[in-house]
Image (cartoon, grey):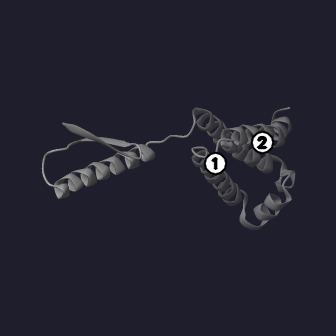
Amino acid sequence: MQKRIANADLVCCLPCDSGTALERENQLLIHQQTYSRARLLNALSIHPPKQALIFSSILIGMQLVDALFTYMGVSRYGIYMEGNPLLRLLMQEFGVIMVLGSVKLTAIFSILLILYSSICVRWAPHALFAISAVYGFAALLPWSYILFL
């Protein structure tokens, strides 16, 4: 005869008549520990939504293209072509490559944080899409116009 014991999502089949109460408690404890390990492994295998992966990949690519365009524009026309006054000041103090590298690595790290948060935060993929759209119009479009037209 089998007895079904339900604990949260855990459903185990334990023999009712075999062993003492202590043995049954030990069996239940072993089943619960096994369930906890399985739950932990499932939690570790959770992935961000596909939308978030796509938009974060696009946004990281846009960051790299913007770094290249900014470097080309500043090299060709001077630091004063940079539209961001803070970046312009930092470029004068520390150099173009150092500032671009630091800023773009920080941006990519921030994108990866948003990507990671998209596992739990439902609006994160939409935020990545909005950031990509704004970034394309505010950063890439002006540099494309200046450099290639």
**Is 57 on the left-hand or right-hand side of 12?**
right
Question: Residue drawn at (72%, 62%), measured in percent from left and top?
Answer: 95
**Is 87 on the left-hand or right-hand side of 57?**
right
How many marks the image carries: the answer is: 2
State the residue in front, 29 or 39: 29
Q: What element carries label 1?
A: helix
Of the residues shown, which amino acid type is indicated by label 1? Ile
The residues bearing labels 1 and 2 have C-alpha atoms spaced at a distance of 15 Å
Question: Residue drawn at (81%, 41%), measured in percent from left and top?
Answer: 143
**Is 7 on the left-hand or right-hand side of 48?**
left
Residue 71 drawn at (x, y percent)? 73, 48
Question: Residue drawn at (82%, 59%), measured in percent from left and top?
Answer: 88
The image quadrant that residue 80 belongs to is: bottom right
Q: Which residue lies furthest to the bottom in this view?
A: 93
For label 2, the residue is: 135
**Which image quarter holds the C terminus?**
top right
**Residue 30 position (above or below residue 124):** below
**Residue 149 position (above or below residue 76):** above
Question: Residue drawn at (84%, 48%), measured in percent from left and top?
Answer: 77
For label 1, the residue is: 114
Of the residues shown, which amino acid type is indicated by label 2? Tyr
Q: What element carries label 2?
A: helix
